Amino acid sequence: MAAPSLRRASSGSFRRLAPRRRWRRYPWYTFYLFLAPWLIVGFLTFTLAPMIINFVVSFTDWDGFPGTHVHWWILDNYKNAWNDPQWTNGVIQSLKFTLVTVVAGVAGSLGLAVFLNQPHRGVKFFRAIYYLPCVVSIVVAGAAFKMMFATNGLVNDVRMQFGGDIIQWLSGDYAFDALITMTVWQLGVGIVIFLAGLQGVSNEVLEAAWVDGSGKAQTFWRITVPLLSPVILFQVITGMIGSLQAYVQAVALSPGSLLGGGTGQGVGINIPYSNQLYMVYAFHQFNTADAFGYGAAMLEIAFVFMLVLTIFIFRLSGRFVYYESAQGGA
Amino acid sequence: MNRRQFLATTAVTAAAAAMASKLEVERVEAEKASGKTVVTLMYASGDFTPANKAEFQKLNPDIQIRQIDVNQTTLNAMIAAGSPPDIISAHYYDIPSFVLRNQIQDITSYLQKSSVIKMSDLAPIANAYRWDPKKLAYDTGSYWGLCKDWSQDGTMWYNKALLSAAGLSVPDLSTAPNFNDLISLGEKLTVRQSGAVKVFGLDLAYDWGHAARHFMHLMSTMAKGSSFYSADGTTCDFGSANATTVLQAAVNWGKANIGPGAITADSSGCNTRLINGRSAMIMQGEWIVGPLMTGSTTGGPVSNIADFVLGPAPVLGSYRVSETYFSQGFVMSAGSKVKDAAWKLVEYFFGPKGADERAKIGWGEPGLKSAFQYFPKTGAAAEWYNSTQTEAKYFATMPYSPYASSDDVNSVMLNEIANVILGKETLAQAQANMTSQVNAKLAAGKASLLG
């Protein structure tokens, strides 16, 4: 039994408190009972079961309808992907999208976090302003950016003010630039995470560096960044996974209605080819092409790729990430 | 908040969530228990309006309508879950895949017994909802649905005022114009400012997914029976001489940037663009009569209604045809447990009462012959009616394949044509890609549907 605690009363004297309750007084299964809703409903029903079903469906030609002939094609869905130019386009565009948004996102949010970590007047106002885009839904952001990038939108107006020509931002290759811009605009979450990381950097370390004659830039690159490296790793991995799974952004920015309209529309009708990211094409298999097997195979390929990439980055991180506790730090 | 408060709050929240779902189940059960038959209808609320719903339920107090807006994802999920809607919005090209999947009800016996919808009153479009799964052919066999309204979707709309302003006149309406001539005319009509298109010369309703179907229509005009698909729909060839002519015309139109497409995006809708003077010529079909008559896209009467002229669908070859690309209709789920009640809804909405009301405002061409008499025929509409009657002589359905989703094939076509327009690949490469991709889809679809 723990020693009783002492607390200072308002009169200034100390008095003894009753021992604090401990979890051990509860039956052993209490923990599992509390865990059960997430485990059964959240994990088993909505995570593990769909993963297993998707894996099985990826080896069939199921069209999504009950009662149709289902054939086991073993690896046919996977083989067909290699010969599908739209699949290849989805892979290339998603990789380009991920590279640009992760690099720009991490670098941009780190830079802004450094700026917002300074004790300037009004810095709290700017912190709120930079976080604001993150509370805007992607659909709403898509509608706003569509208006801005429209032929007669704000971006072209500004270009024309400076003597430029009108650019068709929502079609052709320029649509990819508009998509990147819209995605990187929502840097706020990264800024908040980096701010928390920056504020965890010990002032004593920074002062010691200053005393040793280190300049600002040198201190940042040689001390702050290594100390922030676990946070950077987290941002890179989560950013990479999020970007590889991007879908709503491309659809929200497409010239047509969000999920199709008119007579029913496939992915090529309103989403420019440059914005047909991997997940956009995968969703098309389920929504339009009645190719659930092929779509499931695409998702399995994406899952394995992301898993391998994440493991690779973790393995690589041993060279570039500094963990204070591993080094015997505080 | 201490631990006890947290646990109490969590318990209350969980109970509320459980109660909400229980209440929903109880509501549905209560509806059933009240003696009313619930018919689930998947139809756009702009078509089957709240007023329609209220009127039907007043006329049939023992039937309650549960309406769901049209959404392919929702429909797929409901079918996969084994609880599809009783009545589903459908185009005629949906029929074969539904039939081969045993998803829809043969309604021939209902039609034969109906005292409201007479088989003799069905317009020729009704044959597009007949499909024989043994012959794999339209226009024969059982009726699997009915048409609500339709249009010959390749017909041309001209804005006389814009043509006059450019010193041009409307093409001769007694003959089908050549598509290449329309491209030349469109280039003269297109107004550009600072590199942007202010007025489109030839609009193919790209943002509504019609452009690829227009190109399929042009392929049909190359010769009788001409199509990208083989006669049995199991293979395709986008590399034939006829196909090359059509696809080259498509690329020429796209590169000219005289309509929304791969170069210039526009999501305002072709009806709006025509009525607002943003498009001088549109290939869209008689559907625009409805917005012109009702002012639904302008929020009020269209003041310059006399400026709009309806003309024949263009051709590229020597065979004149004017297809309906999709039509709007319905099918009844084979698994419906309330088929008789659902049929009453069909008789109300797709029967003479509904057809007559829609015909009066020109909302597409009616699915019943008797409703044609109510089609607007005064003022500007008189000319549109005459054009419609002339064009009807060339009526046909589009030669789709039942083995691939037409929207999916459209997507492939538009992606590849866009790549050629933007200079990313040659036409020959695009033709090869289209042929291999669509053939793969056809093979997979055939295996899935026929075993």
Image (tube, coloured by chain):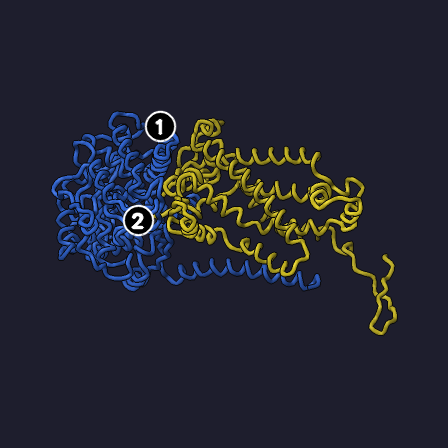
Q: Secondary structure at mark 2?
A: strand
Q: Quadrant of residue B207?
A: top left
Q: Quadrant of residue B449?
A: top left
Instruction: Give A14 or A198, whichever is nearer the viewer.
Output: A198
Tag 1 subunit: B
The answer for how far apart the CA atoms under marks 1 and 2 are is: 29 Å
**Which disc number belongs to residue B426?**
1
- Lateral position of residue A325 relative to residue A252, left or right: right
Amino acid, disc 2: Lys
The colour assigned to chain B within the rendered structure: blue
**Which disc number belongs to residue A285?**
none
Q: In the figure, B447 relative to B276: above or below? A: above
Q: Secondary structure at mark 1?
A: loop
**Which disc number belongs to residue B198?**
2
- Residue occupying the point 31% across, 59% down: B49
- Image chain in yellow: A
Q: Are marks 1 and 2 in contact (CB under 8 Å)?
A: no
